[in-house]
Image: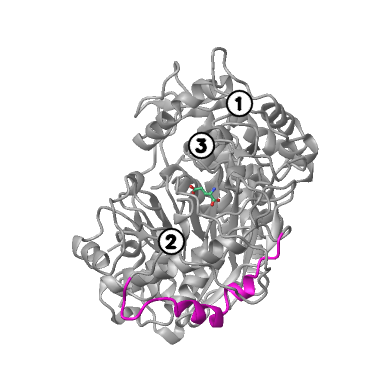
Amino acid sequence: MRGYRLPHHRRVEEDLAPSRGTDMSGSALRRGRLLALLVMALTLVVALAVGASPAGAHGKGDGDGDKDDHGAVHPPDKQSVATGYGGAVTTLDPYATAAGLEVLEKGGNAVDAAIAASAMLGVTRPYDGSIGGGGFFLIYDAEEDEVASIDARETAPLATPPTVFLENGQPIPYDERRVSGLSQGVPGLVAGWELALEEYGTMPLHKLLQPARVVAERGFVVDAEYVDRTEDNLEIFRDFTSSTETFLVDGAAPEEGSIFRNPDLARTYKLISREGPDAFYEGEIAEAIVDTVQEPPVAEGATRNVRPGLMELEDLDDYEAKWREPTEVDYRDHTVFGMGPPSSGGTTVGEALNILEGYELSELPEHDVLHLLVEAEALAFADRGKYLGDPDFVDVPVEGLLSQEFADERRELILEPFAATEKPVPAGTPEGAPDDGVVLASAAASGSTMHLTTTDRWGNVVALTFTIEEIGGSGIAVDGYGFLLNNELTDFATDPGLANSPDGGKRPRSSISPTIVLDPDGEPFAAYGSPGGATIITTVLQVTVNLIDLDMALPDAIAAPRLNNLNSENTNFEASLPVAAQEALKAYGHNLPAPTEDPIGNVNGIEFLDDDGLLGAAEPTRFGGGSALVLEPWAD
Ligand code: GLU
């Protein structure tokens, strides 16, 4: 039995409980539109009557922040677990969660809320994801009972040659690739918003950007994470006039507890609100992006070798967010949906689950479950390294990678009796595999990126993960526009001739793994995701096993200590992994040299309980903890 149950007085008989989304006519997502318009019209009338701003952010309600005397918005209460009904939002930041909830309160749906929350994260967590980057949306449409996904990944400028990251035949060192125009892909998030809204939205973009614009303008209270992340980038920001002006206070990180404003970003959001996404892809923002890429605003006296990039105005004009087929695997009696190529998330999580399906994990001791996780990860990562890339450029054998036959074949490499295999393990040959793939090492985790999860009263669900790649992206802010440009193109391999080699118009392979799981009745069971580079995949995999095999409730599944193996000699683990488990793994022959310095992953998600109950959960402590809110909290 799951730990979080509805209080008795709200429970209804199982057979009387309406099944989510099936009792309505018309698309639930679209039906929300009418209600939202009605509520907005009412809000406007009331606001005009009292002479106030129509949709002032954070003005009321439990989860909303308060404004101080100078107009800054104070952080809403932060709780990592919330239970109730009617809708939920989880993110890693309380401002963003409150922004999403505000949209749900106004009658918006899960897609509207996800966009409002992501726009807010661009203000309060600008080093992890923003309109200067891209991401992947996984959307469950309750009425249609289908899962859709949007690829809003950054794209290499058309002029990018496969050798872009080589000089004299050698790779440009990572730090130099990162802090350069060469790493900056055409940002995709704004186009992703547009595509999601066109299909599913019920509120206009300008309304959804408003809470974030207000906080950018009036300011937010800086927390310890914000200070840390600024300090991580201090040397880089100081080398660029734009980044110094946008993010530093007298050349240093802002102090914890101080109020931080980003008026340039507020103006950028205003431009997008007024002119639509075209302002970003064709208008003055596009021009500013191209100027910054082509002539990075290097500060006087900076000694860094900053290579300019190849992005042109046409690259922005040509950018398209794309509908992609989500990945789907049956695991035990659940169905797990994930993100397909150019992300490697869905195929790698799915292959590992198919491998694990051959064991009764629920009956094994903890160290055996962890051992099998590590072994399945290594095998799936070997295949990821060989076959995953942008499907518009390479044939990715998605079906073969996700077939149970292939997983059964891969499982045969796991030793019996249990012992660690020698790593790296070789890639397999799934059906449909091209014969020219080459195994690549997996990039190390960097821990940037953000995930958020939303659901609404109609039962729609969004899992959105977005990023600017490194913490601080390329470190170069767009001059006068208040946001950093990504360094996503460093996710490409440096060598030509591989599935994930650079090319003009190509999207780099990602690890982003927004996940939606349906229960045996086909109803949402849980949705979640995480940042963490390649460890996004292993984190999401472990949470899935914790939920389905180990029957943990989502907060426990998230809090549990993590470990992973990205198909390399060493297994990474958090210091909180029980010593007995560490010893047992070592006895099987795994190398566990030292715990990771940083936590692995930063998960948030929503679990769907009996009788339409919702359990929102975010990290309790990792990276300062995240924030979960529900529309109608249940009282104990
Ligand atoms: N750029 C990475 C990816 O798309 C995510 C970065 C991170 O989470 O550290 O896979």
**Helix or strand or loop: what does disc 2 sit on?**
helix
103 vs 413: above or below: above
Residue that label 3 marks: 126
Task: Check the picture and name the quadrant holding the C terminus.
Answer: bottom left
Q: Is residue 416 magenta?
A: yes
Three-letter amino acid code of the residue under disc 3: Pro
Does residue 182 appear in the picture of this structure? yes
Give the number of the mark in front: 1 or 2.
1
In the displayed image of the protein, which residue is found farthest to the left? 580
Q: Are marks 1 and 3 in contact (CB under 8 Å)?
A: no
Does residue 456 appear in the picture of this structure? no
**Helix or strand or loop: what does disc 1 sit on?**
loop
In the displayed image of the protein, which residue is found farthest to the front? 168
Q: Position of residue 460 (x, y in %)?
A: 56, 65
Residue that label 2 marks: 538
> What residue appears at the point 67 percent right and 49 percent down from the top-left corner?
496
Residue that label 1 marks: 306
Is label 1 within 8 A of ligand 1 (CB to nearest ligand atom)?
Answer: no
Q: Nearer the viewer, residue 390 or 223?
A: 390
Q: Is residue 635 left or right of residue 534?
A: left
Q: Nearer the viewer, residue 348 or 448?
A: 348
Disc 1 to disc 3, how far (Cα)? 22 Å
**Stretch of the chain drawn in magenta:** 394-419
Q: Nearer the viewer, residue 606 or 66?
A: 606
Give the number of the mark in front: 3 or 2.
2
Three-letter amino acid code of the residue under disc 1: Val
